[in-house]
Amino acid sequence: MQIGDREIGPEHPPFIIAELSGNHNQQLDLALKMIDAAADAGADAIKLQTFTADSMTLDVSEPGFVIEEQDSLWAGRKLHDLYAQAATPYDWHQTLFERAKELGMEAFSSPFDEQAVDFLAGLNVPCFKIASFELTDLPLIKAAASKGKPLIMSTGMATLAEIEEAVTTAKAAGCEDIILLKCTSTYPAEPGNTNLRTIPNLRETFGVQVGLSDHTAGIGAAVAAVALGAQVIEKHFVLDRAAGGVDAAFSLEPAELRALVTETRRAWQALGAVRYGGTEAEEKARQYRRSIYVCRDIQPGEPFSPENLRIVRPAFGLAPKYWDGVQGKVAKCALSKGTPLSWDVIA
């Protein structure tokens, strides 16, 4: 399939998405600098999140509307306050998208309600992204899928049945270009909870392109995901973790994003095909295999033995598999030390 000008599939390098999320800290100039840095690092796309605090939740402090998990990055925060801090203003979108396009990147967003879908469609985004927590919001998926654009969906904690419902809903609304991203809905995520072996199973089960939305630290999980067939990698991005940002703790800095682009491309290139017997590039190295050589001057008629033959590098003599067969045979002519053994010198 194609997202904007980029082909997505096994024959193409992984599509790297830098997720800005709310790490812009409500500063437009910072958001623009993040886009510049993502382009410089080699990212293929930037992604925003399109919502308002009121479209995400209610402004109340009742149970369930305040984050109670003490190990959460946002423990004690009201959902409404957190989403107000993380939101990207609607009137920034066109400016940010245009900057990305000027720098050769694709730019799109995750809508969190149907009004956001319509807004993004009006900006002619190349695709839509459904966040993992919204995978069960079938009306939202139907709305996004009906716009004639590719659909990327993070699976998060969704069951196989829930993923099937989401895919079926998208296809019923007319969307055939679907990418499913393996995702662990913890922030940050631990490698031990990432279960990358799900990626090829997603592809086989649903017959779609696959990838990883990665909340782990570093780039190791993403590189491994490419080795398992991921064609899309999404990572949260920040200019400086120490400067803060709602998702800064599990976001990549520019040098790390550059390393991600480089190493996932290397992993993709290294996949190659099933092949035995060496490549063209290895042909010159064949001479460094071992073969049978004369290791002591030999007179005509002298029998060959371990005293006057050795298996050594390089490989210009008889192959080592003939070692037993030449023992006791005699030399046709005088042979000096360092001569590769060949059939024409054996009587």
Image (tube, rainbow, N blue to C red):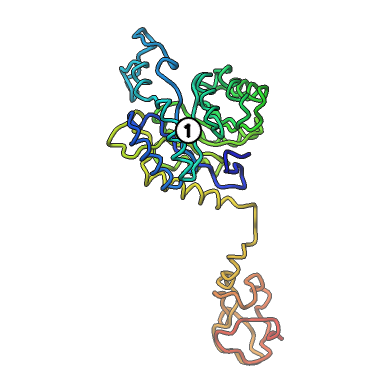
- State which quadrant residue 327 falls in: bottom right
Residues 134 and 84: in front is 84
Q: In the picture provided, is 249 more to the left or to the right than 56?
A: left
| Residue drawn at x 60%, y 43% as measured from the top left | 7
- In percent of width and height, residue 49 lies at 45, 27
- In percent of width and height, residue 142 lies at 61, 20
In this view, the residue farthest toward the top is 62
Residues 34 and 67: in front is 34
The quarter in which the C terminus is drawn is bottom right
- In percent of width and height, residue 122 lies at 54, 27
Q: Quick one: label 1, few (<14), some, or many (20+) residues within 10 Å?
A: some
Question: Looking at the picture, does residue 151 appear above or below residue 51?
Answer: below
| Residue drawn at x 57%, y 43% as measured from the top left | 6
Residues 225 and 108: in front is 108
- State which quadrant residue 244 falls in: top left
The quarter in which the N terminus is drawn is top right
| Residue drawn at x 46%, y 34% as measured from the top left | 47
Residues 150 and 201: in front is 150
Question: Looking at the picture, does residue 183 appear above or below residue 55?
Answer: below
The amino acid sitting under disc 1 is Thr
- In percent of width and height, residue 167 lies at 63, 25
Element assignment for label 1: loop
**What residue did someone put label 1 on?**
194
